[in-house]
Image: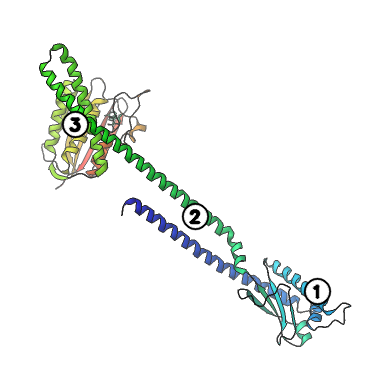
């Protein structure tokens, strides 16, 4: 499975996990709401029992309705029943509200032998999902009817009520969850879209660079042939063509080296004594330095530098450091290279007394395409690829790079690579 699919899988699993957790929290919330509701009902029941135990206007009217006694009133029995049913409803509503219960309810008042009966207008005995709380009444009413009197409170759609109470938690968490999903999808989409654009651009640059190799090679060959037949006057121009062509070839090689590394991201590491490779590249650089009147000296301790390395890439990387020391030099430029073993590590130290690098640029110069601007422009031509290549190579060798530089004083770059025993 590739990285992209792993990320997507992790994301989907995380979102499902979050949804399950949210659902569990919701269940816990509902249970807690249920417990609190029962506690509140318990408290209300006590006061309802108390208030309905004495003879007062309400219990008197209820008593008359229960016992079907309309002798006391001038109206008929139906009106008495209706009035007492409504007054009892209002009384219960008030008592429930007192304890913070504000939901639809209905009630039924009945005697044990069920012969006497009173209920609220919205009472439905068939409602199965409702929550019921029977309250055994004491005092006046049971005494009046000479039987047990039970007031049954019935709450319909109670889960909806709890959910509405929990909406302060559930709706924001659903919104946030939705936001997270939307943002992650957007980020993943942009990331992979950018990746594909970068890959396309890199492929294009690499193909183009590759195509440039043949004409550069032909120009090089033609220049060599012309140089053999040239006179003094044309020699100077041919020299310019050759040096510029060599520079172009170097750039092409750098781009292609980086591209191949980007694609494979691995090197063929072989146990090698790197000492002769280091000496050879120093000797080659000494020749170039002499031609360009740059003071270069090197000191390589006379011992084996056994490394697990890709000697070609490693030599290229160190060459890049020497090239930079020369490119970003100043008048009376002095460059040096030291190679020695310390604490099971090969240290290659490249120093120069050139223009140096400012502190703010130091952390960036190893990034791809980063170049330091001096004044309004770049002082030396380049593409900012050299040091990113060096860093990549040293990382692939499990090595380290230290940078020590001061503006106008010079730069010292130390490469440390593990020695194999
Ligand atoms: P390039 O050489 O193409 O500019 P590099 O990646 O090799 O790219 O270097 C990045 C930047 O780091 C350079 O543009 C330069 O400003 C700075 N730099 C690198 N080496 C040195 C050095 N020895 N002295 C001063 N500046 C340096």
Residue at numbered disc 1: 83
* Residue 73 lies in quadrant: bottom right
- Determine if the C-beta at disc 3 is less than 8 A from ligand 1: no
Q: Which residue does the image show at 79% across and 85% down from the upper left? A: 144
The residue carrying mark 2 is 177
In the image, residue 294 above or below residue 178? above
The residues bearing labels 2 and 1 have C-alpha atoms spaced at a distance of 51 Å
Tag in front: 1 or 3? 1
Q: CA distance from mark 2 to mark 3?
A: 58 Å
Give x and y (percent) for residue 160. 60, 66
Rendered-image quarter of ligand 1: top left
The residue indicated by pointer 3 is 337
Snapshot quadrant of residue 209: top left
User: Nearer the N terminus, badge 1 or badge 3?
Assistant: 1
- Disc 1 to disc 3, how far (Cα)? 108 Å
Quick one: SS at disc 1?
helix
Mark drawn on residue 378: none
Percent of width and height locating residue 248: 23, 27
> What residue is rendered at 20% in x and 36% in y?
348
| Residue farthest to the right, as pictured | 74
């Amino acid at each position: 499975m590739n990285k992209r699919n792993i990320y997507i899988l992790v994301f989907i699993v995380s979102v499902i996990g979050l949804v399950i957790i949210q659902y569990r929290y919701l269940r816990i919330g509902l249970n807690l709401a249920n417990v609190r509701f029962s506690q509140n009902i318990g408290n209300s029941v006590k006061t309802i029992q108390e208030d309905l135990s004495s003879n007062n206007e309400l219990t008197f009217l209820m008593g008359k309705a229960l016992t079907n006694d309309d002798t006391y009133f001038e109206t008929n029995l139906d009106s008495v029943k209706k009035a007492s049913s409504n007054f009892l409803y209002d009384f219960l509503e008030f008592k429930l509200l007192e304890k913070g219960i504000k939901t639809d309810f209905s009630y039924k008042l009945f005697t044990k032998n069920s012969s006497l009966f009173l209920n609220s207008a919205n009472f439905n005995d068939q409602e199965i999902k409702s929550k019921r709380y029977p309250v055994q009444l004491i005092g006046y009413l049971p005494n009046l009817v000479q039987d047990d009197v039970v007031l049954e409170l019935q709450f319909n759609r109670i889960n909806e009520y709890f959910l509405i109470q929990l909406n302060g938690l559930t709706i924001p968490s659903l919104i946030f969850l939705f936001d997270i999903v939307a943002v992650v999808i957007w980020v993943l989409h942009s990331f992979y879209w950018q990746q594909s654009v970068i890959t396309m651009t890199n492929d294009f640059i690499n193909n183009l660079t590759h195509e440039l190799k043949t004409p550069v090679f032909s120009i090089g060959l033609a220049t060599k042939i012309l140089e053999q037949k040239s006179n003094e006057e044309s020699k100077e121009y041919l020299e310019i063509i050759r040096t510029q062509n060599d520079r172009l070839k170097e750039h092409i090689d750098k781009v292609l080296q980086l591209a191949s590394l980007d694609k494979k991201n691995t090197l063929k590491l072989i146990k090698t004594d790197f000492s002769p490779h280091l000496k050879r590249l120093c000797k080659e650089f000494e020749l170039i330095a002499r031609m360009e009147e740059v003071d270069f000296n090197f000191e390589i301790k006379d011992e084996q530098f056994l490394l697990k390395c890709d000697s070609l890439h490693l030599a290229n990387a160190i060459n890049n450091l020497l090239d930079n020391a020369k490119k970003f030099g100043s008048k009376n430029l002095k460059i040096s290279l030291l190679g020695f073993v310390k604490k099971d590590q090969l240290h290659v130290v490249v120093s120069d007394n050139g223009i140096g690098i400012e502190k703010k640029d130091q952390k960036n110069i190893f990034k791809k395409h980063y170049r330091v601007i001096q004044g309004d422009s770049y002082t030396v031509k380049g593409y900012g690829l050299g040091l990113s290549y060096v860093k990549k190579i040293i990382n692939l060798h499990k090595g380290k790079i230290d940078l020590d530089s001061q503006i106008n004083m010079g730069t010292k770059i130390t490469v440390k690579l593990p020695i194999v025993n």
